[in-house]
């Protein structure tokens, strides 16, 4: 419930159908267990406040006060916000809803806010690319898992509400399309389709970085990469949660 409410809160008191459509790869019946019930527990405004507090506490715990107060953090926040302001709202409900939220004052929270905007901007475009590729939400998860660079199938099923039977059926459909081999590995056609999807996603996501420019984009990548390395070292991305199968 916390994930659904936290991510959907910028949209307001939406129903399960809206969440399923905008999140794309979650089982609708699973979503219905928690939405709209979540709004009877806390309003979207209360959820947004809790979301920001959670981000603050997590970043303080994982990065430490020195990193949060650094000039690099302030610079990264400024660059990321500049990129995010150039996102396109059309057909991007999650980006557009988050773009209407106020920018936090503290640099680390401003960076988190900007990262959320950039993530949802890319994510909204990525869902369009998946739909064009005729991949359902579940099929997209199975294909992603087959790369070995995604969360495990167990993590995907637990967090997205899919059953083992549904997962197996989606894998069979992908085999029938020639996208997966008998052992569940990506075929040449499967790898090519994923490359096409990512290339289209990149094109749809170009506006923020075209606006920022090559040099500033490279600098933002450098700064964000340093913070990501620190987060990884602090255990933010447990290796046991990732891998094929």
Image (tube, rainbow, N blue to C red):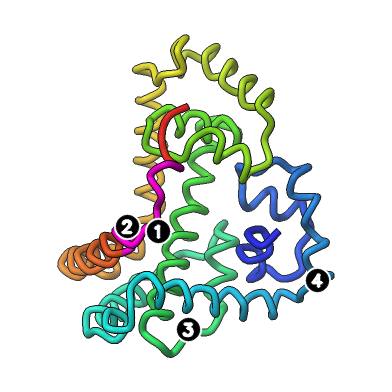
The stretch in magenta equals 231-241
Q: Earlier in the sequence, mark 3 or mark 1?
A: 3
Label 3, on which residue?
Answer: 103
Q: Residues within 10 Å of mark 1 (few under 14, many from 20)?
A: some
Q: In the image, is residue 114 above or below residue 3?
A: below
Query: Alpha-carbon neighbours of circle 3 within 10 Å: few (<14), some, or many (≥20)?
Result: some
Mark 1 element type: loop
Side of 61 where 73 appears, left or right: left
Q: Is tag 4's residue or tag 2's residue first in the polypeptide sequence?
A: 4
Please name the residue that numbered disc 4 is placed on. 41
Q: Quadrant of residue 96?
A: bottom right
Disc 2 and disc 3 in contact, CB within 8 angstroms: no
Mark pair 1, 4: CA separation? 28 Å
Tell me the element at label 2.
helix
The answer to whether marks 1 and 2 mark residues whose Cβ atoms lie closer than 8 Å is yes
Q: Are marks 4 and 2 in contact (CB under 8 Å)?
A: no
Is 66 placed left or right of 215 in the picture?
A: right
Residue located 37% across and 37% down the image: 149
The answer to which of 138 and 197 lies nearer the viewer is 138
- Residue at x-position 41% and y-position 80%: 110
The answer to whether residue 232 is magenta is: yes
The circle on residue 232 is 2
Distance from disc 4 to disc 2, alpha carbons, whole Å, reads: 33 Å
* The furthest residue to the left: 215
């Amino acid at each position: 419930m916390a994930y659904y409410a936290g991510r959907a809160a910028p949209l307001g008191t939406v129903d399960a159908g809206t969440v399923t459509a905008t999140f794309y790869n979650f089982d609708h019946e699973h979503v219905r267990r928690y939405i709209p019930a979540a709004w009877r527990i806390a309003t979207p405004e209360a959820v947004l406040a809790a979301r920001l507090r959670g981000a603050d506490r997590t970043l303080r715990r994982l990065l430490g006060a020195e990193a949060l107060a650094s000039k690099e953090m302030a610079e990264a926040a400024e660059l990321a916000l500049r990129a995010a302001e150039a996102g396109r709202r059309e057909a991007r409900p999650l980006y557009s809803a988050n773009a209407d939220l106020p920018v936090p004052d503290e640099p680390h929270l401003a960076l988190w806010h900007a990262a959320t905007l950039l993530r949802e901007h890319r994510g909204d475009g990525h869902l369009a690319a998946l739909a064009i590729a005729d991949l359902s939400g579940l099929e997209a998860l199975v294909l992603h898992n087959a790369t070995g660079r995604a969360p495990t199938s167990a993590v995907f099923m637990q967090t997205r509400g899919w059953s083992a039977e549904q997962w197996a059926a989606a894998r069979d459909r992908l085999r029938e399309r020639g996208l997966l081999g008998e052992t569940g590995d990506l075929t040449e056609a499967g790898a090519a389709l994923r490359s096409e999807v990512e290339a289209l996603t990149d094109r749809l996501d170009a506006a923020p970085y075209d606006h920022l420019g090559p040099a500033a984009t490279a600098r933002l990548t450098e700064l964000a990469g340093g913070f990501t390395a620190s987060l990884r070292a602090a255990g933010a991305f447990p290796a046991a949660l990732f891998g094929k199968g």
